[in-house]
Image (cartoon, coloured by chain):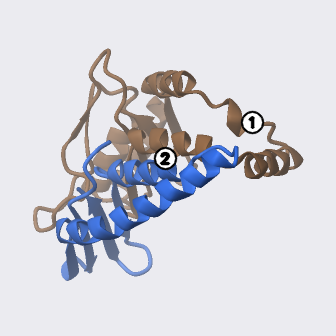
Amino acid sequence: MKCPPLWVSVRIEEHERKRFRLWLPLFFLWPLLAVLLLLTLVCTLLADLFALFSGSRPTYTRLIFGVLGLVGETRGTEVFIQDKTHSYRTVAVTVR
Amino acid sequence: MGDDRTRILELLAAGKITAEEAARLLDALTPNPATNTGPTQNSASDSATSGTETRTAGAPPKFLFVKVLSVKGDNVNVKIPLSLVRAGLKLTSLIPKPAADQINKTMAEKGMSFDLNNIKPEDLEELIESMREMEINVDAQSGDTVRVYAA
């Protein structure tokens, strides 16, 4: 499982002048979310134990790890859109 | 391919596109490049997709690139990690069976006979490996180009 993205950069330019740049430091967010994740994992483990005893397939904890893995794999995504026809706007989103 | 290059040069000569746009369009025409540079940008602005997309022989592709170049100057460039596709498809194995059956049934009704339960990790790796040779080039009559490839 990869490390989740550390920051997201959003840049919007209009007429080649920088209008808006947002830099989201996600690395501040992950420690805070870790507490929530821990609580969620406790709940999913209990749910899986219940599912196991009732004969169902325990999938909740795997689902949480799967979602975490999916979030980690978004690192490296880049979207660049340049509209010169209508608004001469450039939007760039980078996930690192 | 030679006709496309001639058309681009004619557009440039007629002043309908700039030299930068012509260079981008000509780059997009290059078949199976060994190295490919991301879209060229003005020095004043940062490039969102900087860096080179180098295809290393033997290594599986890491990113899926979708590039749309318009003669009017509109430009869309998307770079998606292929491992995201892998992780997403692995999650399908966690879909509860009743829900998976419902999805399969709905897809079959729409004409797509595709069973989510049959997706195996080895098939997925084979699919991603074969994407290394995939390249989709669409050249519209207006001069717009669309390129989809994995590198």
Q: Which residue matches tag 2?
A: A62
For residue B144, say whether it is visible. Answer: no
Crowding near the residue tagged with mark 1, few <14, some 14–19, many ≥20 C-alpha atoms within 10 Å: some
Q: Give the residue drawn at x 37%, y 46%.
A: B25
Position in image of residue B22 (x %, y %): 32, 50
Report the residue marked by disc 1: B115
Numbered label tally: 2
Image location (x, y in percent) of residue A44 = 49, 58
At x 16%, y 63%, the residue is: B46
Q: Nearest the camera: B116 or B32?
A: B116
CA gap between label 2 and label 1 equals: 21 Å
Picture layout, residue B17 above or below residue B90: below
Q: Looking at the rendered structure, which numbered label has been put on residue A46?
A: none
Chain B, hue in figure:
brown
| Letter of the chain that mark 1 sits on in the rendering | B
For chain A, the rendered hue is blue
**Element assignment for label 2:** helix
Q: Chain of mark 2?
A: A
Quarter of the figure with residue B52: top left
The residue closer to the viewer here, A94 or A66, is: A66
